[in-house]
Amino acid sequence: MKALVTGAAGGIGQVLCEKLDRRGYQLILVDRERTSLNAISATLSRPAEIIACDLASREEVERLCETIVTNHADLDVLINNAGIVRPGAVADIPFSDIALQLEVNMNAPIRLIHAVAPLMIARGRGALVTTVSLGGIIALKESAAYAASKFGLRGFLSSLHQELAPRGVKVSGIYPAAVDTPMLHYEATHGGSVLNFIDKVMSAEDVADALLGGMDTGKLEIYVPYSASLSSRFFAAFPWMIRPILPIMERLGEAGRKKFVARKGLS
């Protein structure tokens, strides 16, 4: 069995790779820096293939796709786990930050799925699992580009699920709330949405388990935790209701953010 994981050097990616390794998968680890990937590979029970790839670069993503098609036509699982956030009001951030989030969060996983799906269809089996976010359900201020990337990814997966389920290929999206990873630490100290800190911050293990659940079941959408999805989907149905209650939610979130920063020793 063979699985490819993007964002393998991240907090969720490391935990996920350990779990896949225990299941007996031969792993292909993808992230920007080879050194971090080598360190992860050294902890596994069998050697992993290391591919350094910047998902913000379309040229590098194309080379990755070529490698998969040429050398890994027998791929059983593709897990799109890499993601990036650059918080800030649209009028205040450079367009390069907007483009970066669209490339890494949406364009790259869609391109990889486009390369891998025909391989799995030909074999009549496989699993395409993607870490999305509750940011793909509800859009908040100062996260417009992030929301756009995740909303687009959710729509793509919803359509793809209908296309591939009859052909034996599982398609699943994982929708975590805030997760205790370096990305959340960055948001907590760089103006990210304080609404991340209203509810309990999930662990990387929680999300890794959900990714495995998507791989096993092919369930279209898995929420982590499910309770957080209820309010998100409510406000997604009535987006005009967000603004009136936002000040209250922000006060609660800011209190939670300060506690999180203090607990983690961030600055």
Image (cartoon, rainbow, N blue to C red):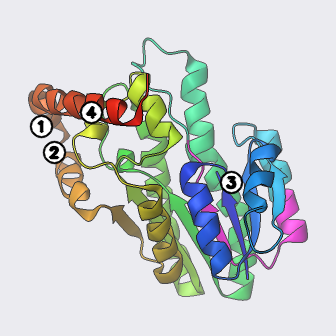
Three-letter residue code for mark 2: Phe
Q: Mark 4 — residue? A: 259
Three-letter residue code for mark 3: Arg
Start-end of magenta stretch: 66-83
Q: Mark 1 — residue? A: 241
- Quarter of the picture containing the C terminus is top left
Task: Judge left or right: residue 204 versus residue 71.
Answer: left
What's the CA distance linking mark 1 and mark 2? 6 Å
Q: Is residue 47 above or below residue 104?
A: below
Going from the N terminus, do you reach mark 2 or mark 3 first?
3
Going from the N terminus, do you reach mark 4 or mark 1 first?
1
Going from the N terminus, do you reach mark 2 or mark 4 first?
2
Give the residue at x 56% y 37%: 102
Q: Secondary structure at mark 1?
A: helix
What's the CA distance linking mark 2 and mark 4? 30 Å
Q: Mark 2 — residue? A: 238
Q: Mark 3 — residue? A: 111
What's the CA distance linking mark 2 and mark 3? 32 Å
Query: Is the residue under label 3 in contact with that under label 2 (CB below 8 Å)?
Result: no
For the residue pair 154 and 174, the one nearer the viewer reads as: 174
Query: Is the residue under label 2 in contact with that under label 1 (CB below 8 Å)?
Result: yes
Three-letter residue code for mark 4: Lys
Q: Quadrant of residue 158?
A: bottom left
Query: Percent from the top left, x then y, of residue 149?
Result: 49, 42
Residue 195 inside the magenta-drawn segment? no
Q: Is residue 253 above or below residue 91?
A: below
Going from the N terminus, do you reach mark 4 or mark 3 first?
3
